Image: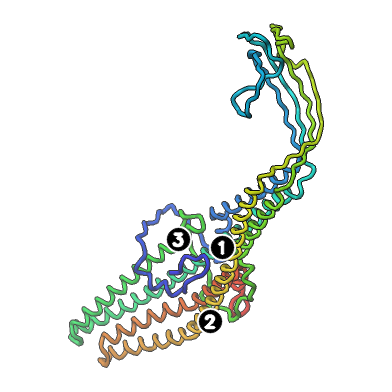
């Protein structure tokens, strides 16, 4: 069976080796729907319905929102406040360190304290704008754009992975169907032979051992057919799962894949265009943007600020409680405007440490990018070598099949004439069924390796384009 593919594929002939490992398949419900797909239709359907693709698209939208969020830092800030309270007014001279527990009290310190309470109110509006940031906000926006670029590259990678997995599952099912057809033909040939042998044995023209051997060979052929059918059902379920319609019965219809593959190889493109490399390159750029943002962070912060505010109190400056609703509304107003500059002097130490971390992360991502290019180049060379080998195999399997058919026909004739043993006929039939499977899978192996070359380059479009043209140049 074709391997689970993320970076490269196994050859199609491995389907035969794993026929005995298929899982039990539950009986299909009569209510299941049947859907038929060409390979192109299957890929398009999977890209629209596979949950991982939808999840990656949502990550792109989240990254786009992150860019918008970063841009909001250019906007001025306006804060509006209102509060009403009732409390005592016992003030005291002295200092407290900044904290979040003790409430500040304004006004003179009185000679005596009181437990009486009065209304208090406050309201105001603060406008603050940072006109100059020495490039820090721009660096943060660039960092957000780098995240967006990475998310976009990851979408392309996800689409490639889903497309490759769909092609893999589709070809696996097609190979399983061809194996079932070959196994059915083998059963039919052995049934015919078994009937003929039993007639000869009943007429005492052959030994009884021939009938037992023929029955055993027929039973083995039926076992192989059952295993092939089991693997076909598993492959069909796997394709339906990838397409997102696990409750449906999927049929494949692709005559081009069973014909002679095109002689031309897909045009070569740089492996740096592969989404795997693009994702890693985006991660390098993301690390670079974070380093740049830290470079622009150790600068003064300048703010233009203006404030309008009002205060109200139910206690007069002498400490007299006015009573009633005095203090519920502001009765003293103030305004102010100015420039504020802040500079975190000792942040330089933490910024240097953060830069060291991000610089190391950048070098790590650059090394991973180089490794990705190296791995993709190796995968492409391997895929090209497998394609060349698959073409040579496909050129010889028709000769093998024709010879196997001739041998099987001759051995049956020789057996009928008493010139060959049943073992010779059985071996010829085993050779024939293997040749039929080899011939069908050899053509599929060429298509699979064509797809493998395209996948290593990061674009299945050339492979899908080849499906639109049959070997004679028409569809």
Sequence-wise first label, 2 or 3: 3
Secondary-structure class at tag 2 = helix
Secondary-structure class at tag 1 = helix
Residue 7, how many percent across, how many down? 53, 67
| Left or right for 3, reference 148 | left
User: Which residue occupies 33% across, 75% down?
Assistant: 187
- Tell me which colouring the rendered structure shows: rainbow
CA separation, marks 2 and 1?
25 Å
| Left or right for 156, reference 419 | right
User: Which residue occupies 66% across, 48% down?
Assistant: 348
Q: Looking at the rendering, which quadrant does residue 324 occupy?
A: top right
* Callout 2–callout 1 Cβ contact below 8 Å: no
Q: Nearer the viewer, residue 204 or 187?
A: 187
**How many residues crowd mark 3 within 10 Å: few (<14), some (14–19), many (20+)?**
some
The residue that disc 2 covers is 388
The residue that disc 3 covers is 238
Residue 156, how many percent across, how many down? 61, 60
The residue that disc 1 covers is 43
* Callout 3–callout 1 Cβ contact below 8 Å: no
Secondary-structure class at tag 3 = helix
The C terminus is located in which quarter?
bottom right
Sequence-wise first label, 2 or 1: 1
Q: Is residue 42 visible?
A: no
């Amino acid at each position: 069976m074709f391997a689970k593919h993320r970076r490269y594929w196994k050859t199609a002939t491995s389907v035969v080796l794993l026929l005995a490992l298929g899982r039990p398949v539950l009986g299909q419900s009569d209510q299941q729907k049947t859907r038929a797909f060409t390979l192109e239709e299957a890929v398009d359907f999977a890209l629209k319905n596979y949950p991982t693709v939808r999840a990656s698209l949502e990550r792109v939208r989240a990254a786009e929102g992150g860019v918008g969020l970063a841009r909001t830092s250019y906007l001025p800030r306006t804060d509006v406040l209102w509060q009403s309270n009732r409390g005592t007014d016992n003030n005291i001279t002295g200092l407290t360190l900044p904290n979040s527990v003790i409430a500040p009290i304004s006004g003179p310190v009185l000679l005596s304290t009181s437990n009486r309470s009065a209304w208090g109110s406050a309201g105001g509006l603060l406008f603050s704008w940072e006109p100059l940031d020495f490039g820090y906000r721009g660096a943060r926006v660039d960092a957000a754009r780098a995240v967006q670029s990475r998310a976009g590259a990851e979408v392309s990678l996800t689409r490639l992975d889903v497309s490759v997995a769909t092609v893999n599952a589709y070809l696996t099912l097609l190979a399983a169907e061809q194996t079932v057809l070959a196994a059915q033909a083998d059963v039919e040939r052995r049934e015919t032979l078994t009937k003929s042998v039993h007639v000869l044995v009943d007429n005492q023209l052959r030994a009884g051992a021939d009938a037992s051997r023929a029955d055993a060979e027929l039973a083995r052929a039926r076992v192989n057919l059952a295993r092939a059918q089991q693997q076909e059902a598993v492959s069909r379920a796997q394709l339906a799962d990838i397409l997102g319609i696990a409750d449906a019965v999927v049929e494949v219809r692709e005559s081009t894949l069973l014909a002679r593959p095109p002689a031309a190889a897909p045009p070569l493109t740089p492996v740096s265009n592969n989404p795997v490399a693009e994702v890693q390159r985006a991660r390098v750029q993301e690390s670079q943007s974070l380093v740049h943002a830290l470079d622009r962070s150790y600068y003064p912060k300048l703010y233009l600020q203006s404030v309008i505010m009002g205060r109200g109190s139910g206690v007069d400056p002498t400490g007299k409680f006015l009573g009633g609703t005095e203090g519920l509304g502001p009765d003293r107003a103030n305004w102010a405007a100015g420039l504020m500059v802040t500079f975190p002097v000792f942040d330089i130490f933490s910024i240097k440490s953060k830069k060291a971390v991000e610089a190391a992360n950048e070098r790590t991502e650059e090394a991973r990018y180089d490794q990705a290019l190296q791995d993709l180049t190796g995968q492409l060379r391997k895929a090209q070598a497998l394609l060349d080998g698959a073409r040579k195999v496909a050129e010889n399997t028709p000769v093998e099949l024709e010879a196997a058919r001739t041998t099987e026909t001759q051995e049956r004739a020789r057996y009928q004439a008493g010139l060959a043993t049943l073992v010779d006929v059985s071996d010829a039939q085993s050779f024939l069924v293997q040749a039929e499977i080899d011939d069908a899978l050899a053509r599929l192996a060429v298509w699979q390796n064509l797809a493998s070359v395209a996948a290593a380059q990061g674009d299945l479009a050339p492979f899908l384009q080849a499906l639109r043209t049959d070997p004679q140049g028409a569809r």
